[in-house]
Amino acid sequence: MLMTFKRILAAGATSFARSGLVSFATVLIMTVTLIIVGTLLLLSAVLTNTLASIQNKVDVNVYFTTAAQASEVQDVQSRLQQRPDVAAVTFTSADDALAQFRQNHTSDTLTLQALDQLGGNPLGASLAVRAKDPSQYAAIVTFLQNDSAASSIIDRINYAQNKVIIDRLTNAIKATQEAGLAIALLFAIASVVIALATVRLAIYSARDEIAVMRLVGASNTYIRGPFIVAGIISGLISGLIALAFFFPIAWYAGRSFTEWLGGFNLFTYYVSNFPYIFLVIIGSGFGLGAIASFLAVRRYLRI
Amino acid sequence: MIYFDKVTKLYRDGTPALEDITLSIAPKEFVSIVGHSGAGKTTLLKMLLVEEAPTEGTIYFESTDVHSLPKSMLHHYRRKIGMVFQDFRLIPNKTAYENIAFAMEAAGRPDDEIASDVPHILDLVDLTSKGGHFPHQLSGGEQQRVAIGRAIVNQPDLIVADEPTGNLDPVNTYEIVEILKKINELGTTVLITTHNKGVVDAMGKRVITMERGRIVRDDAHGQYIL
């Protein structure tokens, strides 16, 4: 048993090494397949992280009247923070709002002059509310409107203006995730089919050999074994090439696109998640090689 | 040892490839089957090797009905028969040595036996110096000798050779015939099909003549007569 296993391993390795061009073509196609698998893996990470960072930027601003006391506003803040659907509430005092306004308009002397003419602070305090999920904003706004203590000091809530944008963004996030998954699946299926066809073609060229092996009295396992071993070797080599391929790509993306991706560094992600990515890519290569060879040889073993 | 009992093989369209063949071959016999192309010689061998099934009749090998063997047992049966083909059928990406060793490996023989037997067989077929050559680096005659080496290495009870000299020149043909004769003298049953009158006449052994799927002559010390 052990002897047969050893022989199958050796025969598989030898046949992989000797059928140079066929092995090369198989490795090439499998590498492309695994690169597609890896790209999907990284793309989904980029997508998830970018969407999360966009979601973080969505908030609703509640502006209070100038008559509202800071303590009243902070009271509303603490009640909001107790809600389970609220992720964070940031308080901006009237003075801070004024300072911020002045800073934003330092070059706009006309506006500043008008502000000085007014005297006092025309701006009220405000709260920036961030929900855990964009769909929860409606409930938060309703809560504020129905709260008598809060509604009496609220000047306006920019939810109505933001509502359209928030809804669109929510839909866009969902659509991107769904479309991303569908495209991912389509690509994965297409590349697996191509890889299967290539392995089958490689084994097709050995069908006479298989017939001879059968006539010499080799058992099905003994004939099939080396082809599967060769397929697995192709898969593993392809996996290693694909993993190596992603290093410079991730490094470049990490260096050049981190800002653009909302602070998501692809290289850091690739390195810190390497065991997981390694397992997926190498595992896919192994499985692809073994299953493709198994299916292909089985065809030519029918008596 | 081999017994064909009223074997008939019809093609799908109903034309007969073999008709009512009854034939027995004793151990250690050397039997030549002759006949024109399409006479049914190769079909006869294919049925013996369970590559094709007969439409009617039964084929026995040492009292076993070979067509009743389950698929999982076929390779055990085939190991009892050494096969030689007109087109050699060596495994192209294995060397001469490995081609012969493969038959032993497939039969599950241990490594030390392979290491001692294969050189011996290479010597027997006079290819000691070419063990490391791949089939495409060998002449037709040399390839056929490798094929014979592969056929005999597991010491089969029977050697079946389908037109073994069909692709060879007279000198190589002579060598192959001499090797087959030697194998037969060592106690192995040999069954060959051939077109070659010279081969049959030189042998002076049993000759079965076939015509259009039937046996028309069966002579104990035959000549090639058609």
Image: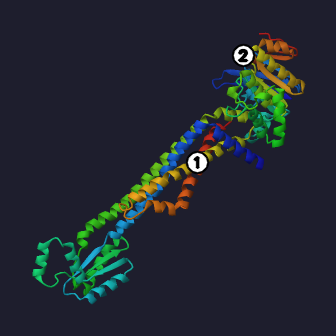
- Residue at image location 25% in from the left, 86% down from the top: A148
Coordinates of residue A263 in the picture (x, y in percent):
38, 65
Quarter holding residue A74: bottom left
Quarter holding residue A19: top right
Q: Viewer-proximal residue, A173 or B8?
A: A173
**Residue B212 numbered mark, or none:** 2
Q: Is residue B65 above or below residue B192?
A: below
Would residue B97 appear left or right of A174 to someone viewing this image?
right
Q: Residues within 10 Å of mark 1 (few under 14, many from 20)?
A: some
Quarter holding residue B206: top right
Q: Are marks 2 and 1 on the same chain?
A: no
Instruction: Please state, as top left, top right, bottom left or bottom right, where the N terminus of chain B lies in the image.
Output: top right
Would residue A254 appear left or right of B31 to someone viewing this image?
left
**Residue B199 numbered mark, or none:** none
Q: Classify mark 1: helix, strand or loop.
A: helix
Coordinates of residue B28 in the picture (x, y in percent):
89, 26
What kind of residue is marked 1?
Ile
Q: How many marks?
A: 2
Q: Furthest residue to the top? A: B226
Q: Is residue B92 above or below residue A265?
A: above
**Residue A237 numbered mark, or none:** 1
Q: Viewer-proximal residue, A36 or A249?
A: A249
Q: Report, in whole angstroms, how far the alpha carbon at label 2 lies from the one at label 1.
A: 55 Å
Letter of the chain that mark 2 sits on in the rendering: B
- What colouring method underlies this structural image? rainbow
Coordinates of residue A101 in the picture (x, y in percent):
20, 76
